[in-house]
Every structure is written in structure tokens, then in C-alpha cells.
Amino acid sequence: MNKWQISINLLMILILTTVIIGCNSNTVYRQFTKIPGVIWKKTDKVLYKVTIDEPVNNAAVYLAMRVDDAIQEQYVDVLVSRTTPKGQQQSAKHRMQIKNAKGMHLGDGAANLWDVEQMIEGDIGFNQVGTYTYEVKNLMPKDVVLLVDIGLIIKKKNDENNDKVEH
């Protein structure tokens, strides 16, 4: 085989490995939204429509953020509202910690990007079949600059090792 064929084979193995590792049967929902211009304006909201085809009794909901290394904020305050298929609404404020008290980034970093995840609802049931709506609203006093993505992840909790969300 020449170098080109070896490179193609290695690339295919890498892609296949990533797909196999990345697939997690416990993941009910996983969606990320790119923030236009990497500036999350104070007035902006991010919506997620989560379709539940069969009831899920024990799940955890995570909020995820991908930030640029140069972000100035140590945290991002948000309001997360959930509306059930029957129209019941519940809201809660959350503080997504981006950096620790010493200004060091939390989460997983690669190049100039950092991924931070935080459980916002644990031991929740999705007992109604239909579409749940999650709305994430910026509660910071000003626009958040260098916020790349915001994500919502829902995972079944059927063992003690589901606290870490796989990307």
C-alpha cells in the first residue's frame, strides 16, 4: 500500500472508532446550537424541541456550553424553562460555571475551545409522550462574548456511571 491508501485506512478507522465510542444508548436527546458571531446577546433565547416517543422514567438533563479560551466570564447565568406536551411549565435559574475562582477553565479543552457540562435536572421523568420544549435564556447583565455553542443533553439514568456526558 502507498502512503495515500494507508492514510485513508487510518482515517476510516478513526471515524469508525469515533462513531462507536460516541454512540450511547442511554442518550435520549442531544442537540447543540451555534451562537451567531459567538456573541450570545442578553435578549437571545435558545429553543430545543425534545420529542419523547415512549416514557422515560429516570433521566438527567444537562446544559452544555462550548466557550472560547479567551472568554472573560467565570460563569453564565441562565433561565431554563421546560414545557411539557400538556403545557405545564417549570422554570429554574442556573449558574453555568465556566472557570474556577483562580480563573482556570473548567471542563474539557482542545485547542482554544472548552466544553463545560452541568446537570440541571436529575432524576426526572418524561412520562408524557410528545414534544417537550426547553428554552434557555441569557440572564447575564450584558452580552456574553465568545460563547460558541449551547447544548441540551438528556440521558437515561440506569446506573451510577451516567453522570459524565459523552460528546
Image: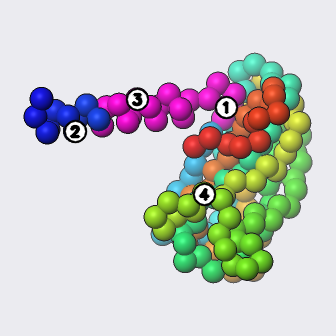
Amino acid type indicated by mark 2: Ser
Gap in Å between the C-alphas at discs 2 and 1? 32 Å
Gap in Å between the C-alphas at discs 3 and 1? 19 Å
User: How crowded is the residue under tag 4: few (<14 C-alpha within 10 Å), some, or many (20+)?
Assistant: few
Tag 3 and tag 1, C-beta contact below 8 Å: no
Query: x, y percentage for residue 67?
Result: 58, 66
Which mark is on residue 108?
A: 4
Look at the numbered disc 4 and give the secondary structure of its residue. strand
User: How crowded is the residue under tag 3: few (<14 C-alpha within 10 Å), some, or many (20+)?
Assistant: few
Q: Is residue 135 left or right of residue 124?
A: left
Amino acid type indicated by mark 4: Asp
Q: Magenta segment, which residues?
A: 11-29
* N-term-proximal mark, 3 vs 1: 3
Q: Quadrant of the N terminus?
A: top left
Look at the numbered disc 3 and give the secondary structure of its residue. helix
* N-term-proximal mark, 4 vs 3: 3
Residue 153 inside the magenta-drawn segment: no
Gap in Å between the C-alphas at discs 1 and 4? 19 Å
Q: Which residue is mark 1?
A: 27
Q: Magenta stretch mostly in which secondary structure? A: helix
Which mark is on residue 74?
A: none
Q: Residue at x 81, y 45 (%)?
A: 82
Gap in Å between the C-alphas at discs 4 and 3? 22 Å
Q: Which residue is mark 2?
A: 7
Q: Is residue 152 visible?
A: yes
Gap in Å between the C-alphas at discs 2 and 4? 28 Å
Q: Is residue 85 visible?
A: no
* N-term-proximal mark, 1 vs 4: 1
Q: Which residue is mark 3?
A: 16
Query: x, y percentage for residue 166?
Result: 62, 41
Task: Work out whether residue 26 or residue 121 is closer to the camera in this orientation and state it.
Answer: 26
